[in-house]
């Protein structure tokens, strides 16, 4: 498979983004409601952690797949900024305002009251560098992953340049080294002492949890796995694995979570199977064997998956302030509430993507030539300024 395949469309990966964002949405929604559904949220946490790991792998893979030799770092960073920051700023502002006018329920602020400076760190996506979970997850909880992504983007020009210099025959060795690192880092996390667990149902001390789940350099391994996997596909050195074997590897990893140390439930145990899934879907797209995830509806929802991921938590806060502290324990009531909120969150995500995210990305993510700037200054819409889509 020659390098020219890097420009092949990968609709299945866009559909996969919707599935991963939906898993995170389901976990947080179940955690919001009371009764038996709240208990189910604890059970879904490893699956949600797997979804976040999948996002990190996808990010490295797609950025490598769409990368053009000679692309300047400044241009790359500009595109990334306008891709992620507007939605983040919108949802972050909404969350901070909601926190200021109404006390959030305990299940949406599991790690305690955030300090005053957490809002500033979170807005600029550097909150993960502080070893305090109440800072990392302050206000808009899912935004902690953007702090990791910001670090990944800062490192990407250096990483892609280094990986492209690796001889093709040695890429598999680099991939194996990263896979081993992903499986070994939880063992390092186990040795880190710290304050008692912040979550009763997940008895891992807070420093160990921060290191294994939140600390950007640790999560960089999954991003790098995505980069090297994309290069293996581009150079024709990725094997075509049976679909059943890929699914079995993920099922086995999830099954082993019952006997592995809890640090492995933070995404490490499933990082390699998720990488196999991403590679398998991409290979199927390249070879014209796309499946259900490439259907237009799922692709459309996948394009709005970042808006869904980053905006659903402020919506949960808003719903909490409307409903108040009194909740019903009836299963049917909570199930109905969860379904209604899911539909609402998806509708809001589609609207944010269509009317806010896309216009800003198209208008500002690419530098305009001087002639186009002149046309803009004269009030004329310049043609050909649409932005190529990249995964978050």
Image: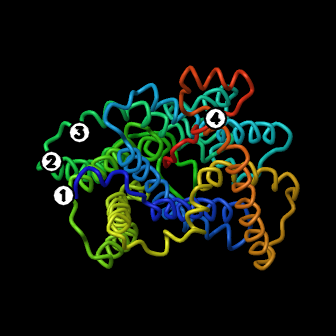
Q: Position of residue 94 (x, y in %)?
A: 77, 41
Task: Looking at the picture, tell me which residue is in the foreground, 6 or 86.
Answer: 6
The residue wearing badge 3 is 164
Task: Looking at the picture, tell me which residue is in the foreground, 42 or 18.
Answer: 18
Q: Are marks 1 and 2 in contact (CB under 8 Å)?
A: yes
Q: CA distance from mark 1 to mark 3?
A: 14 Å
Earlier in the chain: of badge 1 and badge 3, it is: 3
Label 1 Cα crowd, 10 Å radius (few <14 / some 14-19 / many 20+): some
The residue wearing badge 1 is 237
In the structure shown, which secondary structural element does the residue marked by tag 1 occupy? loop
Earlier in the chain: of badge 4 and badge 1, it is: 1
Q: CA distance from mark 2 to mark 4?
A: 38 Å
Q: Which numbered disc, 2 or 4, marks the residue closer to the eye?
A: 4
Q: CA distance from mark 4 to mark 1?
A: 38 Å
Q: Is residue 174 above or below residue 289?
A: above
Label 4 Cα crowd, 10 Å radius (few <14 / some 14-19 / many 20+): some
Quadrant of the image containing the N terminus: bottom left
The residue drawn where x is 54% and y is 27% is 367
Earlier in the chain: of badge 2 and badge 4, it is: 2
Q: Are marks 3 and 4 in contact (CB under 8 Å)?
A: no
Earlier in the chain: of badge 3 and badge 4, it is: 3
Task: Looking at the picture, tell me which residue is in the foreground, 4 or 323.
Answer: 4
The residue wearing badge 2 is 168
Q: CA distance from mark 1 to mark 2?
A: 8 Å
Q: Which label belongs to residue 363?
A: 4
In the structure shown, which secondary structural element does the residue marked by tag 3 occupy? helix
């Amino acid at each position: 498979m020659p390098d020219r395949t890097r420009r092949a469309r990968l609709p299945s990966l866009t559909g996969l983004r919707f599935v991963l964002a939906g898993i995170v949405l389901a976990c947080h929604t179940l955690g919001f409601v009371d009764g038996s559904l709240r208990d189910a949220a604890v059970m879904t946490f490893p699956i949600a952690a797997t979804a976040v790991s999948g996002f990190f792998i996808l990010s490295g893979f797609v950025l490598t797949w769409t990368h053009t030799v000679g692309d300047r770092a400044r241009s790359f960073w500009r595109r990334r900024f306008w891709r992620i920051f507007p939605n983040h700023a919108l949802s972050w502002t909404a969350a901070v305002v909601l926190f200021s006018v109404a006390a959030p329920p305990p299940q949406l602020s599991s790690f305690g009251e955030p300090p005053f400076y957490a809002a500033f760190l979170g807005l600029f996506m550097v909150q993960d560098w502080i070893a305090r979970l109440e800072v990392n997850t302050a206000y808009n909880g899912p935004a902690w992953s953007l702090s990791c992504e910001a670090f990944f983007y800062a490192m990407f020009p250096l990483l892609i340049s280094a990986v492209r210099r690796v001889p093709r025959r040695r890429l598999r060795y680099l991939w194996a080294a990263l896979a081993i690192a992903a499986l070994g880092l939880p063992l390092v996390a186990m040795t880190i002492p710290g304050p008692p667990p912040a979550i009763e149902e997940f008895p891992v001390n807070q420093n160990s949890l921060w290191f294994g789940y939140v600390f950007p350099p640790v999560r960089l391994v999954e991003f790098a796995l995505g980069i090297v996997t994309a290069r293996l596909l581009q150079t024709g050195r990725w094997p075509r694995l049976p679909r059943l074997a890929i699914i079995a590897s993920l099922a086995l990893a999830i099954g082993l979570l019952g006997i592995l140390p809890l640090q492995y439930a933070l995404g490490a145990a499933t990082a390699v199977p998720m990488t196999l899934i991403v590679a398998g879907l991409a290979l199927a797209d390249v070879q014209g064997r796309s499946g259900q995830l490439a259907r237009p509806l799922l692709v459309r929802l996948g394009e709005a998956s970042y808006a869904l991921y980053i905006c659903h938590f402020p919506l949960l806060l808003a719903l909490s302030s409307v409903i108040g502290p009194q909740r019903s324990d009836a299963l049917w009531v909570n199930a109905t509430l969860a379904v209604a909120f899911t539909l609402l969150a998806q509708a809001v995500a589609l609207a944010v993507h269509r009317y806010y995210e896309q216009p800003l990305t198209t208008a500002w993510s690419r530098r305009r030539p001087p002639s186009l700037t002149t046309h803009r200054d004269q009030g004329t819409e310049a043609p050909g300024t649409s932005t190529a889509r990249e995964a978050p």
